[in-house]
Image (spheres, rainbow, N blue to C red):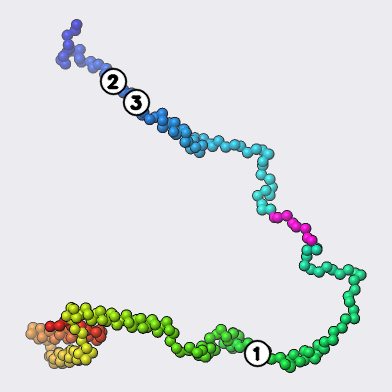
Amino acid sequence: MDPPCTSESIYNLIPNDLKEPPQPPRYTSVFRASIKDDLEKFKTAMKTMGPAKVELPSPKEFLKKHSKEKMLPPKKKFNKRLSKMPAVPLRTDHPVMGIQSGKNFINTNAADVIVGVAKKPKPIYVDRRTGDKHDLETSGLLPKYINKKDYGITPEYICKRNEDVKKAQEEYNNYIQENLKKAAMKRLSDEEREAVLQGLKKNWEEVHKEFQSLSVFIDSIPKKIRKQKLEEEMKQLEHDISIIEKHKVIYIANK
């Protein structure tokens, strides 16, 4: 038995051919056979490779001329007996002669004209100098509606609607009044609102008069501060006046 060779042995200078280990067997699913059977069972002809297997047409069933055109229904034979027109008289037929009526057409027509009412012309109107005529009945120029019995009378449904709106407004006002009383709010009357408005306008006139009395040259800091203060007061008064003039109903908190 040969002794084992170490790495320092001379026999290890030439490398040996490495032998690759054998590959493990390929994995195969257990359900391969059942899935293959299902695919073959439910596979359709259009899912296969190649052209579909269709029966070829017979050479005798070729496309003929005018075969795809719409065909008219067959013509019916004309029957003279069923026609509504009277038959053509024969050459040997003669009209009945010698029949006379006792009616005097001249006197009858004259009496009808004398007794009859003259036909009234259709009312029209002309709107251009070229003589374009239009029907007067549908033009809206005739006073038809003023001759009606209910002309100028408000319809009942509008009166009922106005009453409902008025009632709803009264209920809303009562609701607001109750809420304001609960919230300790007071509504200014028209006299009080007018008095407040006149007072604000009077204050604005006084401030404006004082603003007009300022010197032309504002060359010191106190003058500038005074001018700015008057401008702010005027702007605030103008804002208050515009609010009061815009809103007719004003509520204030009770003290």
Mark 1 nearby-residue class (10 Å; few <14, some 14–19, many ≥20):
few
Which is nearer the N-term, disc 1 or disc 2?
2
Q: Is residue 28 left or right of residue 102?
A: left
Residue kind at label 2, given as amino acid type: Pro
Q: Residue at x 57, y 37 (%)?
A: 54
Q: Is residue 13 left or right of residue 52?
A: left
Q: Which residues are magenta?
A: 72-79
Determine the image quadrant of residue 80.
bottom right
**What SS does tag 2 mark?**
loop
3D distance between C-alphas at marks 2 and 3: 15 Å
Q: Nearer the viewer's eye, disc 2 or disc 3?
A: 3
Which is nearer the N-term, disc 3 or disc 1?
3
Mark 2 nearby-residue class (10 Å; few <14, some 14–19, many ≥20):
few
Q: Position of residue 89 (x, y in %)?
A: 86, 69
- Tell me the residue that label 1 is attached to: 120
Residue 128 visible in the displayed image: no
* Mark drawn on residue 26: 3
* The C terminus sits in image quarter: bottom left
Q: Position of residue 189 (x, y in %)?
A: 22, 88
Q: How many marks?
A: 3
- Report the predominant secondary structure element of the magenta stretch: loop
